[in-house]
Image (cartoon, rainbow, N blue to C red):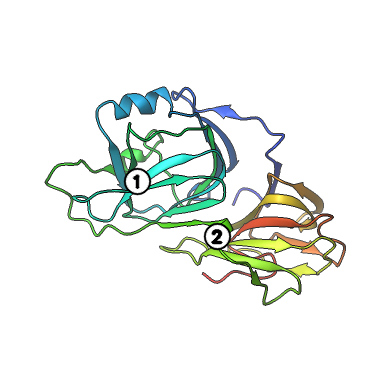
């Protein structure tokens, strides 16, 4: 990895326009030459962008990804998406809203139609273990394969998405930390890392000392709500980190978050954790 750690306040960082796609915007949180994918916050308008509407003027669009696992956690707005297990059958519609988690593993057939549009502008935390899952992204021609609505259909073993609303899952007491609670969104498929929501109560002062990721990997967390205070220990220095809602912290081999028993949160927090549960390495 070309970085030891990345610490961002997404509520204060600029939002960039997506090149050649008016109306689409993005905040890039993690994209490294040694990291085969990206972590970003994507933004879109109600009714889709003009470029997407033009695409849909020719009919519904659906596709699958050849090898990349694509994941979304909805932060704001709504986004309608269809999934098909059988390309000859009816699609199943879900209108994604805040706290929906969607994972499209490779060979998941999904798409959109002109008849079902976003009613609100939307904001997604989006990450993947490779590039080319957006149809307007470099590499899409090789990675993202369109499937029409007439035969012949491709002889592909299509799979189901992992789709749930996080607020409908019950909290489970942490097996490691008294007072902490967790919701495991997925154990990970196709080599992708586990995803867990972690709730830390106000005033918790548990010690944190977890191993750093393996060489070539990174772990990260995103603050869904509340505040978090800890230290990030890197090979050359340590850095105190105070995160609030929208805070992002990623670390690579040789670095890891630590806390020596100081209060972790003034008001409590909920974290989305990828590759760990802050108290330990997550089950893959």
Residue furthest bottom in the image = 175
Q: Can residue 234 be seen in the rendering of this structure?
A: no
Q: Position of residue 46 (x, y in %)?
A: 48, 29
* 88 relative to 27, above or below: below
Residue 249, x across and y down, in percent: 68, 51
Q: Secondary structure at mark 2?
A: helix
Q: Which residue is mark 2?
A: 168
Q: Which residue is mark 1?
A: 82
Quarter location, residue 77: top right
Q: Is residue 33 above or below residue 169?
A: above
Instruction: Tell me which corner region of the image, top left, top right, bottom left or bottom right, holds residue 124.
Output: top right
Residue 155: where, in percent of width, then height? 17, 55
Tell me if I can see residue 156 in this picture: yes
Who is closer to the viewer here, 85 or 275? Answer: 85
The structure residue drawn at horizontal position 25% and vertical position 31%, both measured from the top left corner, is: 59
In the image, is 94 to the left or to the right of 16? left
Q: Nearer the viewer, residue 82 or 29?
A: 82
Which residue occupies 72% across, 34% down?
A: 12
Q: Secondary structure at mark 1?
A: strand
Q: How many other residues sit within 10 Å of disc 2, few (<14), some (14-19) or many (≥20)?
A: few
- Residue 73 lies, with reference to residue 233, above or below; the image says above
Q: x, y (%) of residue 205?
A: 84, 66
Q: Which residue reaches farthest right? A: 262
């Amino acid at each position: 990895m070309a970085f030891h750690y990345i610490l961002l306040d997404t509520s204060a960082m600029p939002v960039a326009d997506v090149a050649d796609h008016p109306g689409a915007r993005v905040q890039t949180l993690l994209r490294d030459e040694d990291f085969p994918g990206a972590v970003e916050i994507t933004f879109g308008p109600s009714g889709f962008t003009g470029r997407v509407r033009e695409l849909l003027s020719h009919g519904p669009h659906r596709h699958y990804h050849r090898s990349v696992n694509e994941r979304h956690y909805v932060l704001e707005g709504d986004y309608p998406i269809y999934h098909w297990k059988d390309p000859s059958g009816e699609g199943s519609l879900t209108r994604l809203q805040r706290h929906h988690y969607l994972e499209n593993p490779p060979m998941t057939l999904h798409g959109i139609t002109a008849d079902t549009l976003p009613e609100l502008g939307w904001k997604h935390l989006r990450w993947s273990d490779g590039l080319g899952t957006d149809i307007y992204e470099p590499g899409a021609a090789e990675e993202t394969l369109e499937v029409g609505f007439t035969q012949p259909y491709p002889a592909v073993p299509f799979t189901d998405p992992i789709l749930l609303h996080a607020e409908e899952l019950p909290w489970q007491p942490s097996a490691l930390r008294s007072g902490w609670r967790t919701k495991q969104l997925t154990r990970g498929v196709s080599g992708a890392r586990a995803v867990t929501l972690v709730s830390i109560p106000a005033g918790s002062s548990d010690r944190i000392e977890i191993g750093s990721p393996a060489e070539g990997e990174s772990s990260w967390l995103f603050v869904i709500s509340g505040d978090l205070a800890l230290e990030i220990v890197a090979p050359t220095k340590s850095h105190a980190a105070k995160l609030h809602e929208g805070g992002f912290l990623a670390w690579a081999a040789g670095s890891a978050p630590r806390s020596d028993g100081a209060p972790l949160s003034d008001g409590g927090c909920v974290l989305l954790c990828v590759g760990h549960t802050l108290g330990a390495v997550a089950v893959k």
